[in-house]
Amino acid sequence: MYIKEEIKRVAKDKKAIILAHNYQNEDIQEIADFSGDSLELSQIAATSNAEIIVLCGVHFMAESAAILAPDKKVIIPDITAGCPMADMATPDELNKMKMKHPDAKVVTYINTSAAVKALSDICCTSSNALKIVERVDAKKIIFVPDRNLGSYVKRFTNKEIILWKGYCPTHDLFTREDLLTIKSKFPDAIVMVHPECRPEVIDIADEVLSTGGMGKFVAETRHKKIIVGTEKGMIFKLKSIAPDKEYIPATDSFICSDMKKINFEKLYNSIIKEETVLTVSDDIAQYARKSLSKMLDLSY
Ligand code: 13P
Ligand code: SF4
């Protein structure tokens, strides 16, 4: 296919690396130099030698790459690809919460704006949230913004966790009844869900994993039939890791429309025109970088 070869050629000429989140459309994941979860994408952005980073994902992912790689040009093929959960926490609201709990430290999910990260003590992703909460030097934690991930972490720590009211509309739509229905159709299948799912869904799942964790799990498990409780794009990634298994989408409506905004044409245009460049003002970036870098340091 001509456009695919052309994207590869231009990316090579410009010393650009294409990164894709695990929820991206199949063709985007295929052409990417690397596809992964939020933590993996930020680790690569922080260490890559490329001159341009093309981030096929949502806004906060490209913004995090821009913060972690300030000497590189970071571009996103569709600047309107956002994350509704990230919009559920504002700097003003966080400041108010911090004033209410002056003895707490703020652990902020990477699915947030740079301005919210800048007001936080440390960031986390779904793959390291519990580790970060445990390692933070405080008994009381304000966990921003995902109430579902926060209450999942709460199950395994003695620390006091103050939950925010945010959630992922894609994962939160998936109900316990939906899961019971699909389980009854495939009684011999094992169930894995993302920690952005509701607590009552998590209660009846076998595994609770980040998208990167799901990839590792299918590579190792002996189970042959797996119900996948997260965005449907993940199934392409899982098939590429362990093609011998059967993957059953937990529901057909498990789609993040923002993730799906990126396509070949937009990717091609963005590399050719070097648009849209993500920039974060220095006064915010310097503090947001501290929160992200602390997370990377504590993730190993
Ligand atoms: P992961 O870090 O697990 O890939 O999750 C990112 C995300 O946005 C899930 O909805
Ligand atoms: Fe945000 Fe949910 Fe989409 Fe992930 S799946 S990017 S949390 S809206």
Image (cartoon, rainbow, N blue to C red):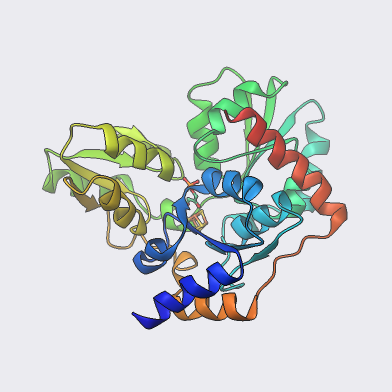
Residue at the image position 57 percent from the left and 55 percent from the top: 85
Q: Residue at x 45, y 61 (%)?
A: 32
The quarter of the image holding the C terminus is top right
Vertical order, 55 against 110 (above or below): below
Q: Indicate the position of residue 99 as horizontal and vertical percent values.
A: 83, 37
- Pick the front one: 1 or 103: 1
* Residue at x-position 21% and y-position 51%: 248
Give left or right: position of 76 versus 20: right
- When asked about the image quadrant of residue 254, the answer is bottom left
Give the farthest residue toward the right: 283
Q: Is residue 1 left or right of residue 163?
A: left
Q: Is residue 16 above or below residue 245?
A: below
Q: Quadrant of the N terminus?
A: bottom left
Quarter of the image for residue 50 reads bottom right
**x, y percent for residue 274:** 65, 75
Asked whether the viewer can see residue 262, the reply is no
Q: Position of residue 194 (x, y in %)?
A: 40, 43
Q: How many discs appear?
A: 0
Query: Would you identify the image quadrant in which residue 139 lies?
Result: top right
Across and down, in percent, residue 142 comes to 68, 34
